[in-house]
Image (cartoon, grey):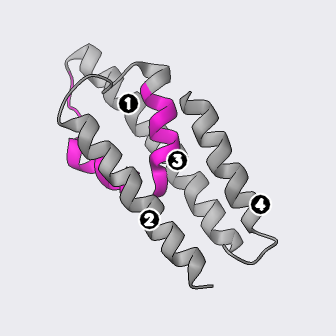
Amino acid sequence: MAVITAAVFFGVLVGLLPLGQVPGWLLAAYALFSAVAFGMYGADKSAAVRGAWRTSETTLHTIVLLGGWPGALVARQVFRHKTTKQPFRTILWCTVVANCGALAWFASQR
């Protein structure tokens, strides 16, 4: 489901490009932050398994808020990481909603 959600989101962004609702750099930023988030979640899962230094939850939430949420959702499913812990899940979804709200506001102003 996470892969479908991310694909639909990026499909919507690509569809908004020719309409002038979002600039190309924004699509690139979402792709970059998503790749970074995916890598961070993978590294954190690996560190958890090894008992090594972990990425702070604040850092993970920050990258999600900045636009890395599609990659984070996919990473959670792929790595089976941070899928059951509360309040992490609640905060994650709040940051996703906040990011999408900011994107909707941005697109409406163009």
Question: Tags 1 and 3 in contact by the CB under 8 Å rule?
Answer: no
Amino acid type of the residue tagged 4 in the rendering:
Gly
Counting residues from the start of the chain, the first of labels 4 and 1 encountered is 4
x, y percentage for residue 54? Answer: 22, 33
Amino acid type of the residue tagged 1 in the rendering:
Ala
Q: Which residue is mark 2?
A: 101
* Above/below status of 15 relative to 88: below
Q: Which residue is mark 4?
A: 15
* Above/below status of 4 relative to 11: above
Question: Tags 3 and 2 in contact by the CB under 8 Å rule?
Answer: no
Q: Is residue 55 visible?
A: no
- What distance separates the C-alpha of mark 3 from that of mark 2? 17 Å
Task: Give the residue displayed 44% in from the left and 20% down from the top.
Answer: 79
Counting residues from the start of the chain, the first of labels 1 and 2 encountered is 1
In front of the other: 70 or 42: 70
Tag 4, which secondary structure? helix
Counting residues from the start of the chain, the first of labels 4 and 2 encountered is 4
x, y percentage for residue 40? Answer: 39, 38
Counting residues from the start of the chain, the first of labels 1 and 3 encountered is 3
* Above/below status of 100 relative to 75: below
Label 4 neighbour load within 10 Å: few <14, some 14-19, many 20+ = few
- What distance separates the C-alpha of mark 1 from that of mark 2? 29 Å
Q: Which residues are magenta?
A: 52-76
Q: Which residue is mark 1?
A: 43
Task: Give the residue displayed 56% in from the left and 85% down from the top.
Answer: 109
x, y percentage for residue 7? Answer: 67, 41
Counting residues from the start of the chain, the first of labels 3 and 2 encountered is 3
- What distance separates the C-alpha of mark 1 from that of mark 3? 14 Å
Tag 2, which secondary structure? helix
Tag 1, which secondary structure? helix
Callout in the foreground (1, 2): 2
Amino acid type of the residue tagged 3 in the rendering:
Ser
